[in-house]
Image: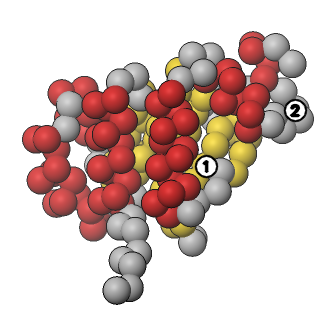
Amino acid sequence: MTDSTLLTAPETPALEDIRALVALPLWDELCGFLHTTWHAAPKLEFSKCSLAFGWNVKYRKGGRALCTLYPAPGAFTCMVSIGQRETSHAELLLPRCTPYVQALYTSSRPSRMGRWLMIGVTSAAILEDVKQLLLLRCPPARKQP
């Protein structure tokens, strides 16, 4: 399968093929963070949505969605939903985020389902913002002493 057909092919691609397509250490770091923090396993799903047509990688903890990763050649986007109950905490976190994530948040329209942030992860600083938003969205279980 070529790079141009991997994400739209009718057969499910292998996670390793997606990883090779993205080819960014930021992808590996985020996937590792999701696994280490929540023991979340990636699930490949095909989206027919015109905004994000093709294969994506979803991470869930229990029944709750953590995020969805949209791979592309040499890039990826992470969709994080900030629900109404997280809004006040997200707005306290926002001043410590990159100007890019701040602008995404303020330009996203709130709905009864929250804000859906489509974050292009292009730097370590933006990746750190994504991690903080995920921790806010779904705090990991505390370890027992």
Give how far across and how far down residue 117 sits, in percent: 37, 40
Closest to the camera, between mark 1 and mark 2, is: 1
Q: Is residue 15 left or right of residue 106?
A: right
Examine the rendered structure and indicate whether residue 89 appears above or below residue 54: below
The numbered mark at residue 58 is 1
Question: x, y (%) of residue 29?
Answer: 48, 38
Label 2 neighbour load within 10 Å: few <14, some 14-19, many 20+? few
Q: Nearer the viewer, residue 84 or 78?
A: 78
Q: Is residue 63 visible?
A: yes
The amino acid type found where label 2 is placed reads: Pro
Mark earlier in primary sequence (1, 2) = 2
Q: Which mark is residue 99?
A: none
Q: Tell me: 3 left or right of 67.
A: right
Counting from the top left corner in percent of width and height, residue 102 is at 20, 35
Q: Identify the amino acid type marked 1.
A: Lys
Q: Residue drawn 64% across and 43% down?
A: 57
Asked whether residue 106 appears in the rendered view, the answer is no
Residue, x 35% and y 42% (percent of image)?
A: 130
**Quarter in which the N terminus is drawn:** top right
41 to 130, vertically: above or below = below
Q: Residue at x 30, y 59 (%)?
A: 136
Mark 2 sits on what residue? Answer: 10
103 to 145, vertically: above or below: above
**Circle 1: is it few (<14), some (14-19), or many (20+) Cα within 10 Å?**
some
Q: Residue at x 21, y 53 (%)?
A: 90
Occupied quadrant, residue 60: bottom right
